Image (cartoon, helix red, strand yellow):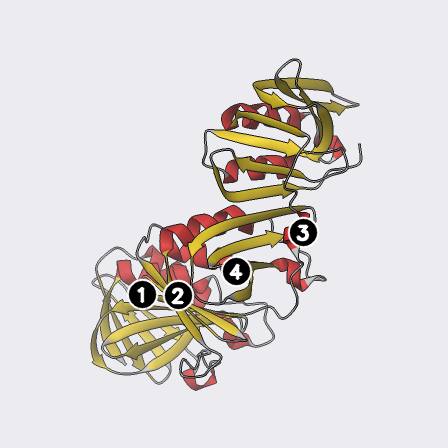
Amino acid sequence: MKLQVTQENLNKALTVVARVASARGTLPILANVLIKTVENRLSISATNLDIAITQHIGAKVSEEGAITVPARLMQDFIGSLPSGIINLTLEDNKLHITTDQYQSVVNGVLADDFPVMPAIDTSADTSHVWTINAAILKKGLQQVAMAASNDESRPVLTGVLIHTIEGNLFAAATDSYRLAEKNLGVNKEDVRLLIPATAIQDLMRILGDYDAAVQVTHDDQQILFQANDVDLVARLIDGKFPDYRKLIPSEFAVEARVKRADLVNVTKVSSLFARESAGSVTITVDEAKNELSIRSVASQLGENTAAATGSIKGSGSITLNSRYLLDALHAFGSDEVSFCFNGKLEPTLLRDPKNDEYVHIIMPLKS
């Protein structure tokens, strides 16, 4: 293998790919990245066996070849080099990296020992291909991914469900304490995919400011996202996602429509006094006063009550986790938000009063 590549392109590719490489895996080679030439381009790949990412970059290839090298070392080293042309030459499983000022040799491992990148057979009856705008996909995933669980004992809750309902594509996630759902727009395919939240986080980083189409290919076991010269393959989670739509109330006894910025501010202030009570705050909606107030008590520090005015229907109080409430509020892009609930033990729903494409539910705490 012999080629030339720019430091900027190689560094960008390693930054995208290397975070998937795992030094804690059972196979030492999973801590490496695979560097190989493909049709006069250079591909950089890494995998942890559940997720695989490959980025293709332009290169001036003189000789074909492939090698795997330590991901962390390669990423840190290339990132430290000045911008300009880098020469890569492979000799006896040693990768020689040279620039005008630097000459380095990195010991590699045969590419034959690297796990085969999974591929989806697009000719099979079980495979499907469709596209979606990158900006819409990224924004939607950002709004729901935070609600996915980190608890590996319940694998189905560690994923983001992407599925179609009556011709519309939805993304949803829940950790059983909160639930987020986003309408991603029209999709004619019959889709029901449970994707690991870790893969979703990597996908959002890959999409960045990219705003063209993302091609999605999937079968019964894995999914492939192709965007911005990057391929991300992930194993789908096997299991039945909860029928979460039964949890979304359609009518509410209490609804407070307030400025989102005001509600963020009063929640932030109250959360300072809620640290020793695991973030517990009590929200009171008062129709007579036309206000929503949040009260928090810290036995050692004191207590706080903060209020926001708005359009109020009904009165009542409910106790929530302030961190979950802040996460939900930050996910909205609207000026106003509707805060709705029925009773102190019923789910709280947040939504944009002018747009029903995104809903966020928070389960109450026992006050």
Query: For the residue marked with disc 3, what is the amino acid?
Result: Lys
Kindly report the distance in space between the C-alpha atoms of the residues bearing marks 4 and 2.
35 Å
Query: For the residue marked with disc 4, what is the amino acid?
Result: Ile
Q: Is residue 74 left or right of residue 323?
A: left
The disc at residue 246 is: 3
- Lower sequence index among marks 1 and 4: 4
> Percent from the top left, x then y, of residue 231?
39, 68
Kindly report the distance in space between the C-alpha atoms of the residues bearing marks 4 and 3.
17 Å
Query: For the residue marked with disc 1, what is the amino acid?
Result: Asp
Query: For this rendering, which residue is in front, 301 or 95?
Result: 301
Q: Residue at x 31, y 83 (%)?
A: 65
Above or below — where is 270 with respect to 108?
A: above
Q: Residues within 10 Å of mark 4 (few under 14, many from 20)?
A: many
Above or below — where is 24 with respect to 366?
A: below
Kindly report the distance in space between the C-alpha atoms of the residues bearing marks 2 and 3.
49 Å
> Closer to us: mark 2 or mark 3?
3
Is residue 149 among what the camera can see?
A: no
Q: Residues within 10 Å of mark 1 (few under 14, many from 20)?
A: few
The disc at residue 249 is: none
Kindly report the distance in space between the C-alpha atoms of the residues bearing marks 1 and 2.
20 Å
- Lower sequence index among marks 4 and 2: 2
Q: Which residue is mark 2?
A: 74
Q: Residues within 10 Å of mark 2 (few under 14, many from 20)?
A: some
Q: Secondary structure at mark 4?
A: strand
Quadrant position of residue 350:
top right
Q: Which residue is mark 4?
A: 162
> Percent from the top left, x then y, of residue 279?
70, 34
Is residue 212 among what the camera can see?
A: yes
Q: Which residue is mark 1?
A: 229
- CB contact under 8 Å: marks 4 and 3: no
Quadrant position of residue 198:
bottom right
